[in-house]
Amino acid sequence: MTWLGATIAARVAAVELLALLARPAMQSFATVSGGDALYLLQRSIWMRNTVVGDPFAPIDYFEAYHSTYGWSGYNYVLAWFHVVFGPSPYAAHLLSTLLFFAAAGLLFRIVRARFGPRPAIIGLLVLTTLPTLFVWSMTPLKEAPYLLLASTALGGAAAAVRAGWSWRGTLAAVLAGVALLMIATVRGDAATLTAVGVAGGVAIWIAGRSRLGLAALAFTALAAVVIVANVPQATRAFQGAVRFASFRQIGHVLTTGHSFRLLNDEHYFDARPQTLPPDELVAFMVRAVVRFFTVPEPWIMRGRSELLLLPQQMLWYLLIGFGAFGVVAGMRRDRLLASLLVAFVAAGALLIGVNTVVPFAVWLSAMGAARQIERGPSRWFNRVDFWAAFFVLVMIPAGVVLYIAFRTPAPRLDAVEPQKVYAPGRVVLRGRHLRPYLHAYLVPHGQTLVLLDRHDRPSQAQYLIRTPNDVELELPALPPGIYDVALLENVELVARLDSAFAVVEVASAPVGVVVADGRFQNVDPRAASPSQGATIRQADGAVAAEVLEVGRDTPQIDGIGPGYVKTWARIEGRVQRPAVVKLRCQVAGNRCWYAGQAVVADGSIDLPFAGGTARFVVDAVRPDAASVAAFEAPMADAIVDFVTWPDMERLVKADDRDGGGAQSWPVHPARIARVMGAERFVGEAAIGTDPYGGHFTVQQPLVRIRAVVRFARQPSGALDWRNRPLRVGGRFTFETPAYALDGTIVGMAQ
């Protein structure tokens, strides 16, 4: 097949071009699909370095064996690939291509044996030439090995069902089971999809053999619906699965890129839903199934790069139409294979697994296209020529018409009036194509807009539209500084105006001054700035920040790891500069807010000095003598249960203070007022976590220490723990030089 050789050669040439386009001054190598692929390749090379003994940074050792984010058994395969051939990031792309074509060849043989040569040739042609699958086949991620293993599982399941209880059937079933287990090590969610696809395909095949089987399948489906609707445990399990899927979809939407929504708008801007009402649960599932087949609709495409995909999207719609014919024709030609392919597509639609299912869906479309060809030429036209002309003369123009007719012009921002304001206040935002239901965020100039972190979002302004050309924005209380205005629609950034306006002073009292001890990070050791006496001034000339003291440069210490579980390491080649900085800020919520950034221990702020913006990591915050009143906080006593190992109660004493985590000190440290008592018991203790966030627990002797702990109280009424709110039922960590305890607040002391 000349075209097959050409597609392989095109992929090899693309990888070679990728190597030529790499910029060594910015990164060691380039990848097809950006950050995820780059991280996976780097991680596998770091793992290789541990095997061969090559030196690398301590942070890289931590990242290489991280057990949650990005973990996959395929990392180890690539690591040994690098051990054998040396660090080979570009050859890893060709390894993915090799695995992809191995999977395509296996599916070709399976389809050819059951559907015939014509559907097999058409399916292979589409699979190897579709533009997105062309890129997908070279991506050094988990998709290519998954496709090969899933194809093996599909072929093994089909062979096992046909062979029955013979030794061939047993061997095929074992092969399918091994493939499923290997998929689970490569990509856990894909193993669920594959298992559902195989089981569903066999069930459809059994149901199609007789009316009794069809009735049994319908009864089973109805019984499952009744159980989920009426049995509380089943209802909670089903809602938990849908909630997990919604969390993943929210995460996709809130990360960089053009994504689509399946939930109501408020779930992307407010707290993630703990439960979904029944109507929203059904709507989420229906939208997921429908948009599995329709995304990206022509009218939601943005920019020239997405418009280039318009012909492929119209071809996808044509393939969907052929797929409907292919299901009917496939059931007549080989019910088992057609049932397996249909079940794979259905599982992908329900589990939102687009990329992992399309390589299986194309064979049904190929069967439908082959059926059209096999009907022979019409009296008036050749069917192949008809469908080719229909695609070029009807489908593509229809896509263009849909894009023009239903596309909403992107908003454009021109100016904010006035440009110097007091906050809170009101400004007028002028532009074009402004419309209702947009969200306006006020981002300190130069900062990246990040919505995924719900606790550290920029301030949001109330958006009041007057005409398509101007909008009123109600500004909340803001610290002095220069702000950008970002407009979002469906949590997607649609317009941003840099340096839109400046807040010249804080109009709402109180205004305080704090002194922050910490360190500037990523400082060039040859640079003088930031130096003692360096200042940042507001638009009205007042000093907003001043460097009081600067210490000697030291190797940088970074906390590596997720959440509060950190490994502290010295980072070679990076320098930090200890400093004491005085900041003029707005005091709100018992916090110092500087330019929209909370100045808190264990946090960081960006300070735009004349020599460049510097990242300042805060270790401790204290008010200056004139601002103490603004920071005074009432105290409250809470009853706390600490659960720990036996004999730890001997170390806990009254007046012990929480020292905070490594490299940080609380502003209002918690203190043990008195120890009420301790009792021993036998309970379950977590000794580790699995890759999915669960805990391994065993029965162990433990001790419960009950104590009265004194906290500062925030204005909201919550207790203050390391600058974070804490309430009854909340868990926290109490650390001293002698011990570290995990506690739960069980009540308030009278």
Image (cartoon, rainbow, N blue to C red):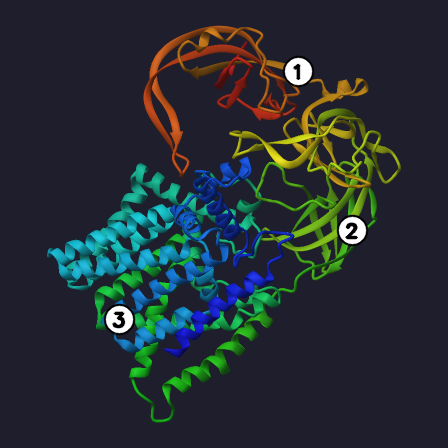
Q: Tag 2's secondary structure?
A: strand
Callout 2, which amino acid? Answer: Val
Q: Is residue 1 above or below residue 497?
A: below
Which residue is the site of mark 3?
A: 330
Q: Amino acid at mark 3?
A: Gly
Q: Give percent across and percent down for residue 258.
A: 56, 57
Q: CA distance from mark 2 to mark 3?
A: 61 Å
Q: Earlier in the sequence, mark 1 or mark 2?
A: 2
Q: In the image shown, does 743 or 281 lie closer to the viewer?
A: 743
In the rendering, at what x and y percent does residue 689 appear? Answer: 40, 32
Q: Which residue is mark 1?
A: 634
Q: Give the residue type that dot 1 points to.
A: Pro
Q: Residue at x 44, y 75 (%)?
A: 6
Q: Which mark is residue 428?
A: 2
> Which part of the image, by quadrant, shows the C terminus?
top right
Q: How many marks?
A: 3
Upstream in sequence: badge 3 or badge 1: 3
